[in-house]
Amino acid sequence: MGGGGHRQACLDACRRYTASAGSSGVPLSDHQLIRRLLADMIVNVRAARLLCLRAGWLRDQRDPVAFMETMAAKYFASTMAVRAANDAVQIHGANGMSDE
């Protein structure tokens, strides 16, 4: 539900990439904008995962609210997958376009 692997893969790639030094010799993760993007990505990945788990649990319980929770989880998770991919492109910049 919602491409959890894609969101996590974007986050993992961004964490690895930003741990390296940028052109100024300072790790990219020390820059405020990069930290904000990573923090948003971390929160959204966790929130999407928890919404999906809750929706699944409610379905297992045969709760009548499960349908609405599943719709909300799918919407949030898919929206966050696109946002994570877009943010990953921003973080990687031109390096995201190379073969390296």
Image (spheres, rainbow, N blue to C red):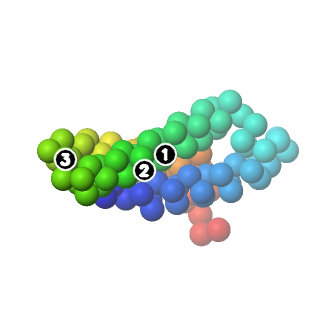
Q: What is the C-alpha distance between the residues marked 2 and 3?
A: 19 Å
Most extreme residue toward the top, as rendered?
A: 32
Tag 1: Cα neighbours inside 10 Å, few (<14), some, or many (≥20)? some
Q: What is the C-alpha distance between the residues marked 1 and 3?
A: 23 Å
Which dot marks residue 46? 1
Above or below, comparing residue 91 to residue 35 in the picture: below
The answer to which of 7 and 24 lies nearer the viewer is 7
In this figure, which residue is indicated by the disc labeled 3? 63
Q: Are marks 2 and 1 in contact (CB under 8 Å)?
A: yes
* Kind of residue at disc 3: Asp
Q: Position of residue 72 (x, y in %)?
A: 25, 41
SS label for mark 3:
loop
* Kind of residue at disc 2: Arg
Most extreme residue toward the left, as rendered?
A: 64
Report the quarter where the C terminus lies.
bottom right
The answer to which of 57 and 9 lies nearer the viewer is 57
* Kind of residue at disc 1: Arg
Q: Are marks 2 and 3 in contact (CB under 8 Å)?
A: no
Which dot marks residue 49? 2
Tag 2: Cα neighbours inside 10 Å, few (<14), some, or many (≥20)? many
Q: Position of residue 8 (x, y in %)?
A: 51, 56
Total marks in image: 3
SS label for mark 1:
helix
User: Mark 2 or 3 closer to N-term?
Assistant: 2
Residue pictured at 64% horizontal, 38% vertical: 34
Above or below, comparing residue 48 to residue 98 in the picture: above
Q: Quadrant of residue 95?
A: bottom right
User: Mark 1 or 3 closer to N-term?
Assistant: 1
Tag 3: Cα neighbours inside 10 Å, few (<14), some, or many (≥20)? few
Residue pictured at 72% horizontal, 34% vertical: 31
Q: Position of residue 63 (x, y in %)?
A: 19, 47
Which dot marks residue 71? none
